[in-house]
Image (cartoon, rainbow, N blue to C red):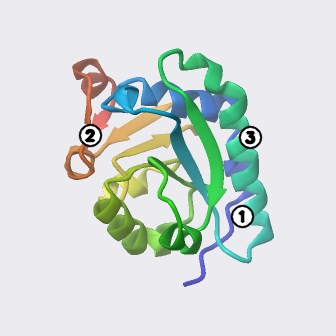
Amino acid sequence: MPVKSWPQESGIGPSEAKTVLNTLKYIRGLERKKGDVVIAVLYQENDHESEAYARQGAEQIENQKVILKKMKVRAETATLEKLNKGIMPDILLIPPNFSTAYPKIRELSKENKLLSLSLGADCARQETCAISIETSGGVDIYLNEKVLSACGYDVDAAFRYMAIRL
């Protein structure tokens, strides 16, 4: 299933990484996890550009993780194929332009109770991601409560009022 490469302008920079990590502060249940909360930044297998942006994103998250005082986070890169064969992360970070992979991501998230976040609003709208973060022209956070509940998480009440609920 070919996926369009992650465009350069949509890469995860310091502000996107900070927004992703700050969003995690509002997810109930993550702070009680023993050990590291593992975030897998997805990329398309055999797509070097996609892999480079995922690696950049994981590095940015690693660089910004000090903002989480009560939670230990570890970011890594992964493909859907690798995830099907290995240990599951706690969170999937899905880059924009992965819409052709949404059915597979939805299935993987549901089966393994993975929290899925995206840097594109359509992921939450299409009931694949629990949370989508749109950073073009400001920050909009979309919350799909149905998906969030299905993966076994909840958010603080304050977050419900900050996010655009779908």
Q: Nearer the viewer, mark 1 or mark 2?
A: 2
Asked whether disc 1 touches disc 2, contact meaning CB atoms under 8 Å apart, the reply is no
In terms of secondary structure, where does tag 3 sit?
helix
Q: Amino acid at mark 3?
A: Glu
One can see residue 138 in this view? no
**What is the quadrant of the C terminus in the image?**
top left
In terms of secondary structure, where does tag 1 sit?
helix
Report the residue marked by disc 3. 59
Q: Residue at x 50, y 60 (%)?
A: 87
**Looking at this rendering, what residue extends furthest in the top direction?**
69
Q: Is residue 129 above or below residue 135?
A: below
Query: Pointer 1: residues within 10 angstroms few (<14), some, or many (20+)?
Result: many
Q: Residue at x 27, y 18 (%)?
A: 158
In terms of secondary structure, where does tag 2 sit?
loop
**What is the quadrant of the N terminus in the image?**
bottom right
Determine which of the numbered discs, if any, sits on residue 153 in the image: 2
The spot of residue 115 in percent (x, y) is: 38, 48
